Image: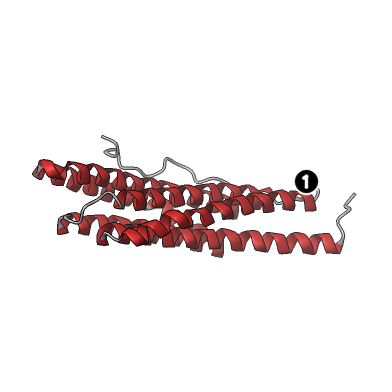
Amino acid sequence: MNTNTPHTVKSYEEELKNLNNNIVKMGTLCEEALRKSINALITNNADEADKIIKNDEEIDKFENLIEQQVVNLIALRQPLAIDLRETVTALKISSDLERIGDLSKNIAKRSLLLSSNLSKNLIDILNTLSENVQKQLKSVIDSYLERSSSMAINVWESDEKIDNLTNQCMQASIDFLKEDPKNLQNGTHLLFVSKNLERMGDHTTNIAEQVYFLVKGEYLEGDRPKNSEIGK
């Protein structure tokens, strides 16, 4: 027997819309944190880095809010009538976004420990990697907003490109480290920054898989495109 009233159904639809909006807002905050963290690193801007570190709390609050919204959605509907794909996907996406926020904060923290004598070549490669990760993050949020499985597939298939760029960035960091013993600290931090960006790419790919599942009701088949040299 269906005990849902028109009011309950309307409340569910409004809560679901709010949930979707909050995922997009959280994703936008993560895009901004990533962009600003790299800018703070390259420009050696300590004030900007401090703001990013502090603003990570706002991203964490969104994750908690989304979790509570999912609980409320379940309470509003009979369990068998709930579209579990919407709620489960939202939880998983918010978790990946929270990790992207944490990684941006980590980059901001490392930028405070870096000096300003980075080579132009290293900065250019780092910028290229960062811009590609930012592009992927924006695309995957757009794929969620538009419920586009094709956009999600494009993000999923581009993960190998992020891996290739990460390898280039890590090699440039190692070369920089070898040039002069004084570069040891900077080079080490930049290796971690490169790896953080690669991990962000992995999280955007996770989100792409969830968006595809949300739209299609099934998971992407086949192994995720990866570059085997990562981590070597």
Q: Which residue is mark 1?
A: 80
- Reply above or below: 148 against 198: below
In the rendered structure, which amino acid carries the disc numbered 1?
Leu
Q: Secondary structure at mark 1?
A: helix
Left or right, 125 with respect to 92, comes to: left
**Quadrant in which residue 224 is drawn:** top left
Measured as percent of width and height from the top left, residue 33 is found at 42, 59
- Reply above or below: 199 against 120: above
| Residue toward you, 34 or 230 | 34
Q: Residue furthest left?
A: 179
Q: Please say whether residue 217 is visible from this viewpoint.
A: no
Q: Residue furthest top?
A: 232
Q: Please say whether residue 196 is visible from this viewpoint.
A: yes
Residue at x 25% of width, y 47% of height: 190
| Residue toward you, 65 or 80 | 65
Measured as percent of width and height from the top left, residue 159 is found at 37, 49
Residue at x 18% of width, y 48% of height: 172
Residue at x 36% of width, y 56% of height: 133
Left or right, 2 with respect to 107, comes to: right
**Quadrant in which residue 17 is drawn:** bottom right
The crowd level at tag 1 (other Cα within 10 Å; few <14, some 14-19, many 20+) is few
Measured as percent of width and height from the top left, residue 54 is found at 46, 55
Quarter occupied by the C terminus:
top left
Q: How many marks?
A: 1
Measured as percent of width and height from the top left, residue 206 is found at 48, 47
Q: What colour scheme does the image use? A: secondary structure
- Reply above or below: 87 against 230: below
Residue at x 36% of width, y 61% of height: 48
